[in-house]
Each structure stands twice: as C-alpha cells, then as structure tokens.
C-alpha cells in the first residue's frame, strides 16, 4: 500500500448516516435490498438492478459514492488494522470521542509467540474496537489487514508487518487473526463482525532496493516455489479463515501484473479456493500497471483487463475514471461490472451495512467505552511478553533481581522511544510505556541515549560509559525504526546502524555488572560482534513491541515473566546480503553458482541466529510418548507404484482419507519458574523433488508450572504435513524416512506403500 491518496481527517465525528435506515425514511422499507428477511443473493440482485451504469461505477472504487434516491450513503472501503485500529487510510480517524485504540505489537513480534489462540484473541479485540468506532462514525467495516507475505529476505522493509518466513506459521497467523476479526458472536458464517483482507497477493516482498522498486519489479518465481512458499498463507486465509477479501499486489509475477492476471484472481482465488468476498487492488495498482509497467496501451484496456481478471474493487480512482469508456468501447460488458459490484455489495450485506441504524443490531451497544479498556491494554502487554525472544543468557545473568540491583544504567537510541515501538500501519495508542519507564518502575535508573537517533552518525559514548561504570547492571536498547526499515525502504545492509556497535562495545567494556543488549527491530541483524562478546551477558530481541512494550521488556528482564518467544525468521550474516541480490526469488539453493537459498527451509549457509531459536529461564525436557515408526499409504489395485520404484505419490483424496498419525510428547519444566513453553515440531523429509531441509509441521504453546509437566499432542496429516511440492507445483507424499524433531529429540517415521 502507498500513501498517495489524499487523507482527510475530520476533527470530530459527523453524525453518521446509515443505509436502509427505515426509521428516518419509511420508503426504504419497500426496497428488496433493505429487507433483512431475504438472502444475501436476492438482496444484492435487487440493488444491482436499480442502478444505472454510472451509479454502478461509483461502487468499483474505495471512496464509494452515494446514491441518495436509494438512501445509500458514501462508504470508504479503505481502513487498516494491522495490529490495532489504524489511522492509515481515509476510512478511520481518531477524535475527542475516541482519541486512541489499543496498539498491539507489530505482527513479527506477535508471530514470535507461536500462539495461535493469541493471534485470534488480538483479532477479536481489534474488531470490537473497530465496531465501537464505526458506531460513532469514526471507522469503516472493511479493514485491509493482515499482511501475510513471506519474509523471504532480511532486507525487506515490510518484513515487520508479516508473521515471518515460514508458510505454516504465516498460514496459522493469517487464518487465526482473520477469524478473530470476522467471526460474529452468534456464530453465523454468513455474517461478518468486520471484513478482513489478506494481502499482498502474491510473491510480493521487495519495496525499494538498489534502484528496483515494487512498481516495476517482475518477480520470476518457479511453480514449485509458488506453491510451497508464496501461496500457502493466502490459500489458508481463504479456506481456513474464510477471509472476506484478498488484495492483489503491485509487482508482476512471471511477466503479468497480479491485478491483471485471470489465472491468479478468477482462476485460483475465486475458482479453486472459492473466495466468499471481494478482490481489491493495492492502491493505484491499475494506474501502476498502465503507466509504470506499460502493460496496456490505453487506460480503458487496463480497466477492462483488471475487471475481466476478477478484480472487484480498485483502491484509487482508476476504475472510476476509465470503466465507462471501456464499456462503450466494447472492451468489457456491463454484466462484468455487475459481477464485481455484486461481490462488494454481498460483503457489505454480510457486515449489516444495509440493515439500518447499527444501534438496533448486534454490536450496536459498542461505543467509546469499549476502546482502550484495561483488559485490551493488558492483552497488548501480554502479547509483547509472549513474543520477546531471549537469544543469549551467559551464566544465567537474566533475570535481573529487583532486590539486588539498586542502580540500572539504561542506554541507547531506542531506550526512551514511544512511536518507534508500534512500527507502521499504526493508530494512536491508548498510552505508551517506554522501555525506560518500564524499567524505572522496577528499580532506580540512570539514562543516557548514547546516540541522537538510530542512524547514530556519532555515538556519544562518554556519558553512557560513565553511568555504566557505576551501575549494578546495564541495559542497552538499540536497533532500528521506520527510518531504517519501512514501506518503500529496504535495507542494503543488516548491521546495527551507524555507530551503534561502537556504543554497545565501549559501554560493555567498562560496565561493572551484567550487560543486557535489547534489539528493537522488525528484521534480523548481524550482531555477531555482540554474540561473541563475553561482557555482553544477555541479548533480547523485542521486535516493535507495541504500546506496552516498555512494561513487557521490564517484565522479562526482571523475571516476572519467563520468556518463551522464538525467532520467526533467520538472522543472516552481512556476508549473505553482500552476495545475494534481493531480486532473486528462488527459495532453493543452486550449488552451480554458489547461491545459498533462503529461509531456514532451504538456506545452506551460516546463521547468526536460526528460525525457532529462543531461550527461557528454565530448562524444559521433551520426551516422546507416542509416535508410529511406519505409515502405509493405501493404493488402488493396478497402481504403477506396486510394480515400479516410486519416490513419491500424488496426493489424491481416496488414499489420503483418515491417514493421520498421533505424536504425543511429555514436556517437563525442571526449573523453579513457571513458563508458557513453545513446542515446535519439525520434519526433515526424504530428499526428493528438492524438498526442504526441514519444515515446520505444527506448534503449541503449553503452560507449565514450576517443576511440572504436561502432554502436547500433534495430529500429523500424512498427505498435508508430510507432503512436498514437486518441480511442476504438484503436491506429493514423499516416500521414505521422515525425521520428526522437537528441540534435540528426533524420531524416524517411514512412509511407504
């Protein structure tokens, strides 16, 4: 998304006007589309047949026009809710009526919790606050979130918005967050609390790197990478999350703009996956593929090609300006326009938009009192705690003791930040607790920023060294912000910016007590200098931890919370980005040219930290208590694999039914501190079809009291979880030995005919 549209933010909410408000105008009761007793299809058909072509075109763009003769008010489709109700997009704004909303951690940190129930719980809070704001005219009902693109390259400025590099984690995050946003309390699958949108479809993960930008980039992707890396989160969003919308991206994929590709839109999203909702373009995407990519000769052709590909709604004004001329030129017929707006209207009907004044409907009692509640703000703090990752803890220097530490030196450009903590696509938070405030609430602190900002062109080391030399412990809070990694801004290196490494090393060398390094960033950093420095006793990664980030950081550092986050992305060395161009989309390594591959699934080189890394303050032991050693796949008589040697089998319904295995683990907390323990189940499949080295099969968060144990159960679907994608994009069950592993525990499972 880009911010090129004019955003207007009224200071106060206008008295909202609602469609089909029969209490204000009884004549609306005669319209079929206002009749709540009719089905969605009948209501949509009634509405579409009442509109002229010019009126229909008003409903193809995000700033949808009003039709006063039918009592339809203006509607703004563009609102955002990436990690809380956002002021990005003209559909939502804050005022004295609702001055702020709960600002959860940026998605990359929430994903690090590996807690599917948390993803859904956050979505539920966000949708409640959104409904409350809608009721007083401050928000829309259609939110263009979540971003579920794969964090393929550590330099990507928008990686912070995503759930990380793993297709399964991204799938579970996307479908979980969507369910939290959309599901109504009455459980009716045809009703929506708010409408979510999974974006940016597809293979979109480069913004602006060394002269290549997203508006001109053609992502060349193999069928294999497409189907086993880039598409799964979107597929899950539609099939498991029942998402109401998918947004197509700016880039081309294999020479076609995604918003003009009938195979990707009408073929896959609408055809294979049966989207119940609308497909929207990223903002000005049509203008981009006409003017920047020169994909069509005329704007009318661009409008027609997008609609015929399956696009329903244009963020921007392009379809509003060029669709009528495209119809008159015979490039697209009116029935295609009807089809597009029908998908849009059906979504609004599911949201109750055509049901009159919402105060008389479900969620009608929500209002300003339901935004920024203490429970919502506590969930923001809990989400940050669950995501924070402990990467180093020499000699058990953490947690710090609040009784023995009398003075704490707090140093670094991110030590007292507010807005940095919430990342991008943000809203106005309820309030902020900075890291300095969070730590100062526990013990006495002294503070020195050490750098004027994260760019840190000149480190002011003297003041920082002075306070570190006398304090009982030192916490250095460094990293990045939106000036380093952001939309439209990819990194060219992955080192700590400017003179931050100098500040960290100089301070560590003179510190009297333990030195804790806290990295606040969306992407990984090459911090090998700190990892190997014995004076730096602890390292935490805290993402962009949201409005309560400072309190959560203090909770972890002082041991009132036992860290359980795990990295959702690989941390590479700088040498990786020096030799791998960001424009190379291939996931798999290529030994012929030294290309090392990408993400933990395929990357063959050295890492600083790996996907899934993270420590706790206690030791947890895993023990396998149930797992088969052999699974036989039934084949119909006469199948070629009965007589020929096969490496893999096609995934077909008949042989896959009821083919699941149970994996049960005993997890025992041997320490004196309770913890929410993260269990990650991986599989290393047989090496067929250039399969991954390992891939995530499942994850669970389990609460373990001090010196207690619990059972974690995984059901592994053989055809879904133990399959790989072959070179032409078909899913196959890999025959042979699959090695299942959790931590250091390994178990061999053979799949055969």
Image (cartoon, rainbow, N blue to C red):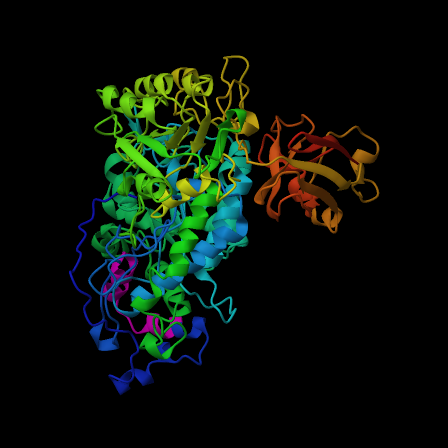
Q: Is residue 434 shown above or below 585?
A: below
Q: Quadrant of the N terminus?
A: top left
Instruction: Tell me where the magenta segment starts and ends, as one range.
Output: 44-63
Whether residue 548 appears in this view of the structure is yes
| Residue at figure coordinates x 55%, y 26% from the top left | 602
Q: Is residue 748 left or right of residue 637?
A: left
Residue 616: image x %, image y %? 55, 36
| Residue at figure coordinates x 27%, y 42% from the top left | 418
Of residues 751 and 469, the one drawn nearer to the viewer in this rendering: 469
Quadrant position of residue 255: top left
Residue 313: image x %, image y %? 33, 55
Quadrant position of residue 509: top left
Residue 149: image x %, image y %? 43, 40
Magenta span includes 46: yes
Q: Is residue 458 left or right of residue 608?
A: left
Q: Is residue 720 shown above or below 455?
A: below
Of residues 348 and 703, the one drawn nearer to the viewer in this rendering: 703
Q: Is residue 366 left or right of residue 64?
A: right
């Amino acid at each position: 998304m880009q911010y090129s549209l004019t955003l207007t933010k009224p200071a106060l909410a206008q008295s909202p006007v609602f469609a089909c408000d029969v209490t204000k105008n009884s004549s609306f009761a005669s319209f079929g589309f206002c009749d709540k007793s009719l089905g969605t299809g009948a209501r949509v058909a009634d509405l579409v047949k009442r509109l002229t072509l010019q009126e229909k075109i008003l409903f193809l763009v995000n700033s949808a026009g009003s039709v006063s003769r039918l009592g339809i008010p203006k509607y703004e489709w563009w609102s955002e809710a990436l990690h809380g109700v956002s002021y990005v997009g003209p559909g939502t704004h804050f005022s004295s009526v609702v001055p702020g909303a709960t600002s959860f951690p940026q998605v990359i940190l929430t994903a690090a919790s590996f807690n599917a129930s948390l993803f859904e719980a956050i979505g539920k809070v966000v949708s409640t606050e959104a409904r409350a704001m809608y009721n007083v005219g401050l928000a829309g009902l259609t939110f263009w979130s979540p971003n579920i693109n794969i964090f393929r390259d550590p330099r990507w400025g928008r990686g912070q918005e995503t759930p990380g590099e793993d297709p399964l984690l991204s799938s579970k995050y996307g479908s979980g967050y969507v369910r939290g946003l959309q599901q109504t309390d009455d459980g009716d699958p045809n009703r929506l609390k708010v409408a979510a949108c999974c974006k940016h479809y597809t293979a979109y993960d480069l913004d602006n790197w060394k002269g290549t930008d997203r508006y001109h980039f053609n992502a060349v992707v193999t069928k294999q990478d497409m189907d086993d890396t880039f598409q799964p989160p979107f597929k899950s969003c539609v099939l498991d999350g029942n998402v109401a919308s998918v947004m197509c991206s700016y880039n081309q994929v294999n020479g076609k703009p995604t918003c003009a590709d009938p195979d990707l839109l009408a073929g896959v999203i609408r055809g294979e996956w049966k989207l119940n909702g609308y497909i929207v373009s990223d903002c000005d995407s049509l203008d981009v593929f006409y003017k920047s990519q020169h994909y069509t000769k005329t704007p009318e052709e661009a409008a027609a090609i997008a609609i015929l590909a399956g696009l329903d709604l244009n963020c921007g004004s392009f379809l509003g300006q060029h669709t009528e001329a495209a119809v008159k030129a015979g490039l697209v017929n009116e029935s295609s326009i009807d089809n597009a707006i029908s998908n849009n209207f059906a979504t609004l009907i599911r949201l109750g938009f055509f049901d009159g004044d919402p105060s008389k409907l479900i969620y009608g009692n929500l209002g300003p009192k339901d935004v920024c509640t203490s429970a919502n703000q506590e969930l923001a703090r809990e989400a940050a705690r669950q995501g924070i990752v402990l990467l180093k803890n020499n000699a058990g220097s953490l947690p710090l003791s609040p009784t023995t530490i009398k003075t704490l030196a707090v140093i670094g450009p991110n030590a007292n930040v507010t807005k940095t903590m919430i990342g991008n696509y943000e809203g106005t938070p309820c309030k902020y607790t900075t890291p300095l405030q969070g730590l100062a609430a526990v013990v006495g602190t002294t503070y020195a920023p050490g750098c004027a900002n994260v760019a840190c062109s000149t480190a002011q080391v003297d003041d920082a060294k002075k306070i570190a030399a006398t304090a009982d412990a030192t916490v250095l809070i460094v990293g990045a912000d939106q000036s380093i990694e952001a939309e439209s801004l990819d990194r060219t290196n992955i080192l700590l910016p400017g003179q931050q490494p100098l500040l960290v090393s100089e301070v560590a060398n003179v510190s009297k007590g333990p030195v804790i390094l806290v990295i606040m960033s969306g992407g990984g950093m090459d911090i090998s200098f700190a990892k190997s420095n014995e004076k730096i006793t602890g390292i935490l990664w805290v993402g962009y931890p949201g409005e309560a980030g400072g309190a959560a950081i203090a909770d972890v550092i002082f041991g009132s919370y036992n860290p359980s986050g795990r990295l959702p992305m690989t941390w590479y060395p700088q040498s990786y980005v020096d030799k791998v161009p960001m424009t190379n989309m291939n996931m798999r390594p290529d030994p012929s040219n030294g290309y090392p591959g990408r993400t933990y699934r395929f990357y063959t080189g050295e890492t600083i930290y790996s996907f899934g890394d993270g420590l706790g303050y206690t030791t947890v032991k895993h023990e396998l208590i149930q797992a088969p050693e052999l699974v036989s796949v039934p084949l119909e008589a006469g199948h070629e694999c009965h007589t020929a040697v096969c490496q893999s089998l096609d995934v077909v319904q008949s042989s896959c039914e009821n083919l699941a295995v149970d994996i049960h683990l005993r997890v025992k907390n041997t320490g004196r501190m309770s913890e929410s323990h993260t269990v990650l189940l991986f599989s290393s499949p047989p090496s067929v079809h250039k399969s991954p080295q390992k891939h995530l099969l499942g994850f669970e968060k389990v609460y373990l009291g001090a010196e207690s144990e619990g059972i974690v159960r995984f059901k592994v679907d053989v055809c879904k979880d133990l399959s790989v994608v072959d070179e032409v994009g078909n899913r196959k069950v890999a025959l042979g030995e699959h090695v299942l592993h959790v931590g250091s525990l390994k178990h061999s499972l053979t799949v055969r005919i």
